[in-house]
Amino acid sequence: MAVETMSGHIAPAGVVEGLPGVVTDFSSDKQAFPVHWGKAMMWIFLLSDTFIFSCFLTSYMHVRMSTTVPWPNPSEVFALSLGGQPIPLILIAIMTFILISSSGTMAMAVNYGYRRNRARTTALMLITAGFGATFVGMQAFEWTKLILEEGIRPWGNPLGAAQFGASFFMITGFHGLHVSAGVIYLVVVALRVWRGDYERAGNYEVVEIAGLYWHFVDLVWVFIFAFFYLW
Amino acid sequence: MSYVAIADQHAHLHDPQTFLTKYVWSQDHKVIAIQYMVTAMAIGLVAIVLSMMMRLQLGFPGTFHFINPSNYYQFVTMHGMIMVVYLLTALFLGGFGNYLIPLMCGARDMVFPYLNMVSYWVYLLAVLVLVASFFVPGGPTGAGWTLYPPQAILAGTPGADWGITLMLVSLAIFIVGFTMGGLNYVVTVLQARCRGMTLMRMPLSVWGIFMATILALLAFPALLVSAIMMALDNHLGTSFFMPALMSLGDPTVHKGGSPLLFQHLFWFFGHPEVYIVALPAFGIVSDLISVNARRHIFGYRMMVWAIVAIGVLSFVVWAHHMYVSGMNPYFGFFFATTTLIIAIPTALKVYNWVLTLWRGDVHLTVPMLFAIGFVFTFINGGLTGLFLGNVTVDVPLSDTYFVVAHFHMVMGVSPVLVVCGAIYHWYPKMTGRMTSVTLGKLHFWLTFLGTYAIFLPMHYLGILGLPRRYFAMGDTYFIPQSVQEMNAAISIAALFVAASQLIFLFNLAWSLKHGKPAGGNPWRATTLEWQTPDTPPRHGNWGPELPVVYRWAYEYGAPGYKDDFVPQNQPPDGRVAAKHG
């Protein structure tokens, strides 16, 4: 089979098989991907954004490994006292749970969008946005606690390496901006769904494109969670 | 889901009516392209003036009292940054990318014209912020275009008050604006080609711009991140890049940061950046050479794969800019190897350009002169790159004039020659008029020979050990007096080259009114942009029907046709193709 494809064998229906077939399909005329251009654009934007977060995270790892001052223990810094008992990472666990849940409601919204269920799509998108807003709110709480109670500042902290606060505020801040922008984005799209814009256009792809962005923001959080809080 | 490929969608043709929507707030990719080009060339003129100031100081030290060491470093910095980012990147991708992609792919416009328009205005804002840094207290930053910390933000470096902040802000704005445009270019190439235009039928210009845009979308994030971190170090007192150190006798607030981290981030952007300006030049030169040699490009598929390979490799060579920064020797070995591997696809392209010329029916038009000139300067710069790519050779040559000569040849002069050639080539399509051939040839010879007069001697100065970025050499024992004479000669040549760019600008302005009418296809080229029903093309480019493509972009001298070229959209049975406007 491979030999045939290498020699340019063309199947009866005009389909090239094997690896050359992949190239032929991808480079066929009019479009490379059989999707709306907006979706392709969102994917490429997210790829670019991935590089931004990768640079942030690798920079954080670099300064964490190169500093000679001990790194504060995240389990202790991010612990909350509940009933007189410090529970490590409890706030972050709840935040993570909320954000992951919002991915679930977003996926349901996309599903109802393609079923042309205007009311449920709107409701689920607003729920997703609400989860996102809750996440940002809890992040604000976390920041307040760290700044006021633990004395952690971008330029230094009493617990150890100065880069701890710097990396923390920069990375979670940049991610928080992404979530906040996503909340606004979701609300705008939800209102347009409700108004019936996509019903008239006969195309709910915009909901899915917003969903792509939202899932991406969640996925980034998983990496931040793993590399910053669990390391 | 109901969704139709862009090429199959029904056209909504409307011409903007008012002056504002037609020429200022225009969403037409052709108008945006020209806005990009004019802005980029305007800021480029500033960069040329800055380089002349540097040359005046180096050629005639002590003569010009308005140039002090601080100014000199500011000139060096701003010249480099403007030329690389605000001129070449913006001109190739924002200018030619915008103009050529929809026309060459057979699209009516970019996929998201509104975002495309916003992209230009954000770029303009970035340029204005950059220009503003000339007028703030302390002036623009003098940190060198690489902006290495710690010195970039320490007091004592020129522009440490405002200049460095404005530079970082301007870069961040530029990246935001570029991302808006870049997404458009990539998605338009992928999703909005006309019927019959497969990826492997696209002209190499589009391939080069396409790949360069992908590089930019993946490389600029590193610059954005390093700009954010440096701004935090500067204003919030964080210590990402700043180690504990003394500045002007006092300890700074910083502790424990890593200056090397910045260098890694910067060059992870900086090296792809070289190819962001080189790949569009490669593509455009391929087309200029093929059209003017009346011969198909040699090894089209190889040329495409070489562009892709260079693009991929450009992400794994960045630390060859850091051989003298202190690295594990094994890293040097790795990065030297990957660097030298890039020479393979690059040399392949050079061979293919030359083989396209071989036994071609070469017409020495003005664009062709620039294209051939590019091949010369690019080979020259590429060969010195082999020296600098090797660690042991690079270490003594690092930070000498040899490096200056190398990168000016390979990513300064070469892309600029292509920019000039490309403007001469597509000017008739943009304006409907030809440029003056006499002035064009004069411009070419002055520029081409002049740049050799500037940069060839610099190789020798570098081998002699002359360090770059020095305000004045003073009495250094290993620098003979003749170096000063050579520097003076270089400066005089530089003044001539700078002045000859005025010929270029005059030619463009004069030809707008007085140039010969060009007709639709003055170069008798095959690609789609020459087959538009109107010249210059109207909003929507193609009239009611989109073109249909039947062949690749390089059908020159095919037997059995009346002309020596066959347009891409001419049907195979020989019926008359779309009328030339």
Image (cartoon, rainbow, N blue to C red):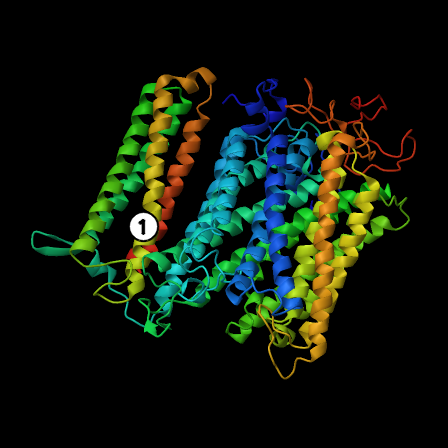
Dot 1: element: helix
B317 lies above or below A223? below
Q: Between residues B203 and B512, which one lies in front from this camera angle?
A: B512
Residue at the far bottom in the pictured view = B477
Q: Position of residue B24 (x, y in %)?
A: 56, 29
Q: Position of residue A146 (x, y in %)?
A: 20, 55
Q: Report the residue at 30% width, 33% height from top.
A: A129
B378 lies above or below B5? below
* Image-based side of A124 in relation to B298, left or right: left
Does the image show residue A59?
Answer: yes
Q: Position of residue B463 (x, y in %)?
A: 69, 75
Q: Quadrant of residue A11?
A: top right
Residue at the far top in the pictured view = A200
* Image-based side of B84 in relation to A89, left or right: right
Q: Quadrant of residue B151?
A: bottom left
* Image-based side of B54 in relation to A226, left or right: right
Q: Which residue in the structure is indicated by mark 1?
A: A172
B114 lies above or below B480? above
Does the image show residue B458?
Answer: no
Q: Position of residue B531 (x, y in %)?
A: 76, 27
Q: Between residues B190 and B294, which one lies in front from this camera angle?
A: B294
B303 lies above or below B494? above
Q: Report the residue at 51% width, 36% height from top.
A: B121
* Image-based side of B317 in relation to B505, left or right: left
- The amino acid pointed to by label 1 is Thr
Please identify the quadrant where the C terminus of chain B is shown: top right
Q: Report the residue at 86% width, 41% height from top.
A: B294
